[in-house]
Image (spheres, rainbow, N blue to C red):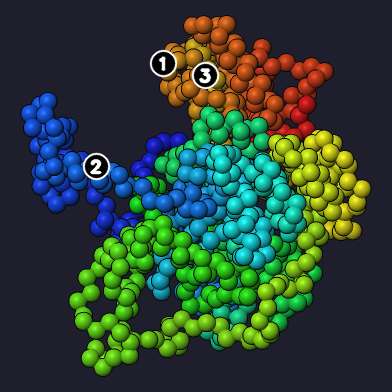
C-alpha cells in the first residue's frame, strides 16, 4: 500500500526524536552556530576573521597569528581518505518496524516482537566512481543499514543485485583494480566501459553472472527509493534452542523496482550528477518517506546440498520461486541528515557487527569481509576509536579494557584495564550465552588446509542463462545495447572477441548480436542447455504507482484554469510530485485570472529530469523559442516512452501519424475523464509498445 503524500514542504525533522532513541542520543551532539559569536576552538572570541596579523598593513605576517594557524591547519586536514570502493554515497535516518516475531528461527532482539521499532541509519552508494562522480553511472549500488538495537549495533550490508562478481575474497582487489581508473591518467571515471575491466571479465568467467545484471536495466537504477537489494552472502539465524538456519536478506521497495534508460542515465549524469542524492533528500523533505520491506530467505542446515546451486556461493542467487521470501518488517526513511561529513562520510559499516541470533556461514567471501571492513574503516577514520563517533556509537553502553588510541573520547576513570583481575572484581566481566552473551554457532569443521574452492561453485553459466531467460524482450534489447556500448568502447579487438566468446555460453543470439555490433567474429559455440526462467528476475513484474512520479507541467499564460486545477489536484491526491515549467520564473496567469507559481524554466529544467509531461500550452513572450523548447521536451519524453498528457491548448504539438502510435499519450480534447486517464498513464511509468 502506498502512503498518500503531500507536495507541501515539511520539516527535515519529521519523526526525528520523539521516541527514536538514536536521534535523542544524537541531539546532544547537534550544534547550531546561528546567532552565536565566533570563537577559536578554545572558545576565545574573535574580533577579525578577514585579515592575517601583520607588521604594518604592508609588512610581513607574524608567527604569533594563532587564529590564522588554527583556521588554516584545520582546513588543510579537513578531508579524510575516500573509501576505496563506495566513495560516492548518501545517507538518511529511519525506523525499522518488525511485522511478526521470528523467535522460531532467531533470537535477534529486533526481530522478536510484532510492532517493535528499531532506529536505523542507511547509506546508499555506487562502487566504481570517486566522491565527485555522477550518481547515474551504470554500476552496482550498495546499501548499508545500521540497526541501533538494544544489544548493540547490527550492520546489514547489501547490494542491488543478488550475485557477486567474485567467489573468493582473494579476487576482490583484482576486480576493483581492473574496474577502477587506469593508473597512468586516472581515466575513466565511474564506468567499466574500458579495456582493463572487460579483459578481467573475459579471463575470470565467474564474473559474467554479475556483469549480466549490471548490463541489464538493474545497472542504471532510477533512484534509491526504488532500489531492491540483497545480502549476497549467506548468514545464519540462530534461535534460543541453538538451532541454526541459513539465511539471506533482501530489501523490497514498496514503490517497486524501476530503472533509467541508458541515454537518460548519461544525460542526467551531466545535467545533475547529484540526481539520486537530491531525489532522496527531496522526497523525505516532502513527506514521501521511502519504504522498504525486509525479506528473509531461509534454508534449513540439513538442506545445504538439496539445491542445484551451492547455498554458500556468493555468485549464485537463491530463486524466490524455489526459496520463498518471508517479509518480516518495514523500513521507513523519515529524516534527512544534517551534516554530510559527520553523518555519511564518517558512518562505518562492518558485516562483523552482529547481535546474538545472527551468525556467519562458511561463505568464503563473507569470511573475507569479516576481516577487511574494520581494517579499512580504521584506515579511513584514523583510529580504532571510530566506534565512538556519534553516528557509529551504539545505544547500549559498552565496556571493555581498551583505553587509548587516537581521538579517544570517553574518559574511563577506573585504573584496572586487563582481564582476569581481582582488584576490580574481575570486571568488566564476560556474560554467559543464556544471559545474552554472544556465542559463535558451533559448526562442525573438518578438512585439509588448502587454497582452492568447492567444485560445487564451478557451474558459472546456468544461472546467468536463467537470468537471461527471465527477461522480457524489451529488457533483453536494453541488455544487448549495454553490452554493445560498453564493449564498443574497448580498443583491444582481442578483448572484444574474448567477451563475445564468453557470452555465447549464456545465449547464442545475444553473443552473435553483440559480436556484430562491436566488429568481431560471431562465436561458434552454444549456450548451456537451461530453459528455466523466474518471474522475480524481471522488473516487468514490479509494482507501479503514480506516487512520487515527477510530472513536468509545460505552461504559458492564458491557460485553461479549471483543466489544470483538476489535473494538478488529481495528481497531488495520488502522491505525484508536480514541477511547473514555464518560459520564465514569473507566475503564469490563466484565462480566468487565477495564477500558478512556476518552479523551473525551460532552460533550468530538462525533459530528462521528469517522469511524465503535462503539456498545457498557452501564450509566451517569445513564441518561436517557446515552440522549440516545448517540441524538444515532448520529443525527448516520447522517445523515452514516458507518459504525456496533452491539454486543450497543447494539441498542436503532437499528432498521430504513420511513424507513431501515440501509446501513452492522453488528450484532454473531448475527454471528460482526462485527469483520471492521465493519472493512470503516469502510474504505468513507460509505454514500451510505443512507436
Would you call the spot at circle 2 few (<14 residues within 10 Å), some (14-19), or many (20 or more)? few
- Is tag 3's residue or tag 2's residue first in the polypeptide sequence? 2
Residue 465 in picture, x, y percent from top left:
81, 55
Residue 354 in picture, x, y percent from top left:
48, 72
Picture disc at residue 132: none
- Is tag 1's residue or tag 3's residue first in the polypeptide sequence? 1
Are circles 2 and 1 on residues that touch, CB within 8 Å? no
Secondary structure beneath label 3: loop
Q: Nearer the viewer, residue 73 or 353?
A: 73
Q: Residue at x 79, y 44 (%)?
A: 494
Q: Nearer the viewer, mark 2 or mark 1?
A: 2
Provide the residue designation for mark 1.
Answer: 586
Q: Nearer the viewer, residue 65 or 79?
A: 65
Estimate the spatial distance between the alpha carbons at disc 3 and disc 2, rounded to whole Å. 42 Å
The C terminus, quarter of image:
top right
Are circles 1 and 3 on residues that touch, CB within 8 Å? no
Would you call the spot at circle 3 few (<14 residues within 10 Å), some (14-19), or many (20 or more)? many
Picture disc at residue 72: 2
- Is tag 2's residue or tag 1's residue first in the polypeptide sequence? 2
Left or right: 336 as drawn, with respect to 549: left
Q: Residue at x 81, y 60 (%)?
A: 462
Picture quadrant of residue 409: bottom left
Secondary structure beneath label 1: loop
Estimate the spatial distance between the alpha carbons at disc 2 and disc 1, rounded to whole Å. 43 Å
Picture disc at residue 602: 3
Left or right: 572 as drawn, with respect to 161: left
As displayed, is residue 689 above or below residue 176?
A: above
Amino acid at each position: 500500500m502506498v502512503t498518500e503524500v503531500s507536495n507541501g514542504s515539511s520539516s527535515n525533522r519529521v519523526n526525528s526524536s520523539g521516541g527514536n532513541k538514536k536521534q535523542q542520543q544524537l541531539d546532544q551532539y547537534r550544534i547550531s552556530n546561528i546567532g552565536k559569536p565566533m570563537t577559536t576552538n578554545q572558545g576565545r572570541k574573535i574580533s577579525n576573521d578577514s585579515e592575517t596579523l601583520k607588521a604594518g598593513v604592508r609588512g610581513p605576517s607574524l608567527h604569533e597569528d594563532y587564529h590564522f594557524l588554527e583556521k588554516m591547519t584545520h582546513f588543510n586536514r579537513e578531508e579524510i581518505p575516500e573509501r576505496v570502493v563506495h566513495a560516492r554515497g548518501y545517507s538518511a535516518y529511519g525506523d525499522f518496524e518488525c511485522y511478526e516475531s521470528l523467535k522460531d528461527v532467531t533470537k535477534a532482539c529486533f526481530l522478536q516482537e510484532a510492532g517493535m521499532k528499531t532506529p536505523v541509519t542507511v547509506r546508499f552508494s555506487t562502487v566504481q566512481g570517486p566522491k565527485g562522480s555522477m550518481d547515474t553511472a551504470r554500476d552496482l549500488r550498495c546499501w548499508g543499514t545500521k540497526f541501533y538495537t538494544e544489544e548493540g549495533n547490527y550492520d546489514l550490508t547489501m547490494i542491488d543485485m543478488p550475485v557477486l562478481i567474485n567467489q573468493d575474497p582473494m579476487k576482490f582487489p583484482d576486480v576493483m583494480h581492473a574496474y577502477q581508473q587506469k593508473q597512468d591518467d586516472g581515466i575513466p571515471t565511474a564506468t567499466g566501459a574500458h579495456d582493463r575491466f572487460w579483459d578481467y571479465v573475459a579471463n575470470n568467467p565467474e564474473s559474467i553472472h554479475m556483469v549480466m545484471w549490471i548490463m541489464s536495466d538493474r545497472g542504471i537504477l532510477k533512484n534509491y527509493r526504488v532500489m531492491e537489494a540483497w545480502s549476497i552472502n549467506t548468514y545464519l539465524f540462530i534461535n534460543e534452542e541453538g538451532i541454526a538456519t541459513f539465511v539471506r536478506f533482501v530489501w523490497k521497495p514498496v514503490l517497486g523496482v524501476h530503472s533509467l534508460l541508458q541515454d537518460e542515465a548519461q544525460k542526467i549524469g551531466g545535467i545533475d550528477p547529484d540526481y539520486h542524492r537530491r531525489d532522496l533528500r527531496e522526497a523525505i523533505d516532502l513527506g514521501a518517506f521511502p519504504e522498504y520491506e525486509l525479506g528473509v530467505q531461509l534454508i534449513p542446515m540439513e538442506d545445504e546440498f538439496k539445491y542445484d546451486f551451492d547455498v554458500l556461493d556468493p555468485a549464485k542467487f537463491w530463486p524466490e520461486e524455489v526459496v520463498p521470501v518471508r517479509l518480516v518488517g518495514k523500513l521507513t526513511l523519515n529524516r534527512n541528515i544534517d551534516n554530510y561529513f559527520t553523518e555519511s562520510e564518517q558512518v562505518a559499516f562492518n558485516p562483523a557487527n552482529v547481535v546474538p541470533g545472527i551468525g556467519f556461514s562458511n561463505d568464503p567471501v563473507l569470511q573475507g569481509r569479516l576481516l577487511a571492513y574494520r581494517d579499512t574503516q580504521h584506515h579511513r577514520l584514523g583510529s580504532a576509536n571510530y566506534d565512538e563517533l556519534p553516528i557509529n556509537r551504539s545505544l547500549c553502553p559498552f565496556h571493555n579494557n581498551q583505553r587509548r588510541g587516537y581521538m579517544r573520547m570517553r574518559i574511563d576513570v577506573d585504573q584496572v584495564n586487563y582481564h582476569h583481575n581481582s582488584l576490580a572484581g574481575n570486571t568488566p566481566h564476560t556474560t554467559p550465552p543464556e544471559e545474552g552473551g554472544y556465542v559463535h554457532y558451533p559448526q562442525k569443521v573438518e578438512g585439509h588446509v588448502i587454497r582452492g574452492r568447492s567444485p560445487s561453485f564451478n557451474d558459472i553459466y546456468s544461472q546467468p542463462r536463467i537470468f537471461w531467460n527471465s527477461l522480457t524482450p524489451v529488457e533483453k534489447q536494453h541488455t544487448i545495447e549495454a553490452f554493445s556500448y560498453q564493449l564498443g568502447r574497448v580498443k583491444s579487438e582481442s578483448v572484444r572477441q574474448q567477451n563475445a566468446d564468453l557470452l555465447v555460453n549464456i545465449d547464442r543470439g545475444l553473443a552473435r548480436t553483440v559480436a556484430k555490433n562491436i566488429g568481431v567474429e560471431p562465436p561458434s559455440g552454444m549456450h548451456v542447455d537451461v530453459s528455466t526462467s523466474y518471474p522475480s528476475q524481471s522488473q516487468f513484474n514490479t509494482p507501479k504507482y503514480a506516487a512520487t512520479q515527477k510530472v513536468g507541467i509545460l505552461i504559458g499564460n492564458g491557460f485553461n484554469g479549471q483543466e489544470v486545477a483538476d489535473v494538478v489536484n488529481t495528481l497531488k491526491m495520488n502522491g505525484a510530485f508536480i514541477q511547473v515549467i514555464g518560459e520564465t520564473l514569473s507566475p503564469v496567469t490563466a484565462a480566468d485570472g487565477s495564477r500558478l507559481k512556476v518552479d523551473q524554466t525551460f532552460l533550468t529544467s530538462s525533459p530528462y529530469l521528469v517522469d511524465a509531461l503535462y503539456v498545457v500550452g498557452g501564450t509566451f513572450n517569445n513564441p518561436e523559442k517557446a515552440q522549440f523548447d516545448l517540441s524538444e521536451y515532448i520529443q525527448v519524453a516520447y522517445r523515452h516512452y514516458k507518459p504525456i498528457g496533452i491539454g486543450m491548448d497543447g494539441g498542436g504539438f503532437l499528432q498521430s501519424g504513420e511513424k507513431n502510435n501515440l501509446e501513452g499519450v492522453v488528450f484532454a480534447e473531448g475527454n471528460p475523464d482526462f485527469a483520471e486517464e492521465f493519472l493512470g498513464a503516469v502510474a504505468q511509468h513507460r509505454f514500451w509498445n510505443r512507436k
